[in-house]
Amino acid sequence: KEGRANVHRMMVLRGPSGAGKTAMVRALASDLSFEIVEWRCGANVGYQRSRDIKADHTTDLEELRRFLRSAQSFVPLASVQDSGAGAKMSLILLEDLPYLHGPTQRDSLVSTLALLCQTSRVPCILVHSDSQ
């Protein structure tokens, strides 16, 4: 276990839209019995405030930060491997990152992802489709 402190658990898959990046992640996760916890830009607003019309507006970047903070509670690989077959391993899948409205938001996203690389206890896969 010594030397694992510097291991970053993030992978970036990049390629043309429709090339099968996400399908590959899902197939591998299924074969390896990983539970996929997925975040998609704009699709996660309901995970905390499903019917609350009066909720304060939050940006997609803020929603991503909230999601990643909650991801800290996922079961790490080392714990699952030590505890046997009872627990299911988790994997974070990030798709369609927030649209960035300038350098401040870009810097914020970069620092959020850098922190995720340093602190995540579970593997994280970022899927990015190249623009046409």
Image (spheres, rainbow, N blue to C red):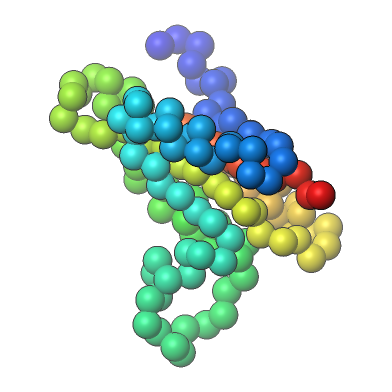
Horizontal side of residue 130 vs 10, given as left or right: right
- Vertical comparison of 110 with 65: above or below: above
Q: Residue 21, how many percent across, how many down? A: 58, 37
Q: What's the residue at 40%, 84% (across, down)?
A: 52
Q: Residue 61, how many percent across, how many down? A: 62, 61
Quarter of the view holding residue 59: bottom right
Q: In what quadrant of the picture does the N terminus appear?
A: top left
Q: Nearer the viewer, residue 108 or 127?
A: 127
Q: What's the residue at 81%, 49% (across, down)?
A: 132
Q: What's the residue at 48%, 70% (across, down)?
A: 45
Q: Nearer the viewer, residue 46 or 71?
A: 46
- Vertical comparison of 1 with 86: above or below: above
Q: What's the residue at 46%, 50% (across, down)?
A: 38
Residue 44 appears in view: yes
How many numbered markers are drawn? 0
Residue 122 appears in view: no
- Vertical comparison of 7 with 48: above or below: above
The outermost residue toward the top is: 2
Quarter of the view holding residue 46: bottom left
